[in-house]
Image (tube, rainbow, N blue to C red):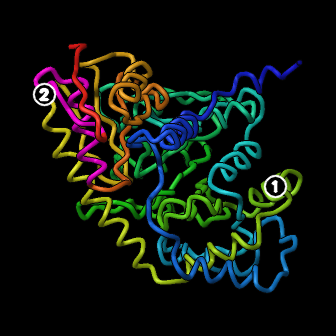
Amino acid sequence: MILSHLARSIAESPTLRLNEEARILRERGEPVINLGIGEPKNKAPIMAVLSSASKLNAGDIKYTPPDGTPSMKKAIIRYTEDNYDRIVAPENVIVSSGAKQCLYNLFFSILNPQDEVIILAPYWVSYPEIVKMCYGVPVIVTPEDGTFTPRISEIERAVSSYTRAIVINSPNNPSGAVFSEQFIAQVVELCERKNLYLVMDDIYHRLVFDGLKAVPAYHFSNLDVDNSNIVVINGISKLYGMTGFRIGWVIGSRRLVEVMTNVQAQTTSCTSVVLQAAAEGALLGLQSIVENLRLSFENNRNVMMQELHSFSGIHIIRPQGTFYCLPDFRAYSGNSVELSQFLLRKALVVTVPGKEFGMEGYLRLSYAGSVKDITTAVERIKWALDPNSPNEIYIGDRKMIRDWL
């Protein structure tokens, strides 16, 4: 069998693989706890369900315009005005099957072979792979001071004549960091000065804690959307807990959206009318679900921090948003892949290796689940790693004795 060099170079999604491993273990009756999954546990908003059901009941499920239905785009325009203080036209909006497809369409539309995209570590695992799938080169910038926020000088040093775009994800997956207004303003200024695209992945932008706000990049530019290189990616997966609906969108210049629409029309043709109706229902329905999720995640964050601080040797920077944290486990192992496999085998806890996010020796832990899952999982991790913890523990109904420390 002959496969392309490019296809063979693309890495497997570690989070999807780990979720599948957790599913198989559960089917075997193992009391596994999944701290690797990146999705809220809530039911879909009722208006999303009713809106999609109305389309199904009508039975008129046909092609939609490749850039999205007019009513869905109208809902996105309203959402953008409410949350970004920007009025955009329908021609500035394209709806796709999730934020991943948005990113793929975008990079396919702006990159020539060997063009570079600057990605800040820690980064979402799919950024480098999507860039490579579009024949681009990911350039990773890792903060030199041990934090999760680089200095603008570190980013500017990475800019070359091949640089085409900078990707910012704030609040950040996997660290939960929220970049400061000063930092976002500096990145906007850099991109406008160097004529680079600034790709703002805002998929978590309302899931922030401690009274903070993820300020839109638009606030630091005097250019209108059609003359700006700021591109905003968003969707319903995280804010509304609608991960399975696979609806995302892009706000960009008319010319960019036109090209992205051509790309989408030649690949997936269009986005499902049923799923767009669900997303429209979520955007136009009661927004209390977003605040309820945010409050729940903030409480879970506090519980996770309290539990992790009981460890000796773990260093953690308190997340300011999302539903992830990224503790430093290098006191126990410098190999995050081996450590993650060890914790799954011994403690039946799923974690995601930090290596996948450009942070070797770290583990990403999700606190999107229940408080009980958080406390029980951290207790198991502590039992497996910390010699100061009790030597015995019950995992499910089995008494386990630690014999490796």
Q: Position of residue 150 (x, y in %)?
A: 37, 35
Q: Please state the horizontal and vertical placement of residue 97, each as a whole percent of the image.
A: 70, 58
Q: How far across and how far down the image is residue 360, in percent?
A: 40, 22
Provide the residue designation for mark 1: 264
* 228 to the left or right of 182: right
- Whether residue 48 sits left or right of residue 143 in the image: it is right
247 vs 109, left or right, is left
Magenta residues span 372-395
Q: Nearer the viewer, residue 319 or 18?
A: 18
Q: Residue at x 49, y 29 (%)?
A: 356
Q: Is residue 329 magenta?
A: no
Image quadrant containing the C terminus: top left
Quote the CA–CA distance across marks 1 and 2.
54 Å
Query: Viewer-proximal residue, 340 or 26?
Result: 26
Amino acid type, mark 2: Ser
Quarter of the image with the N terminus in it:
top right
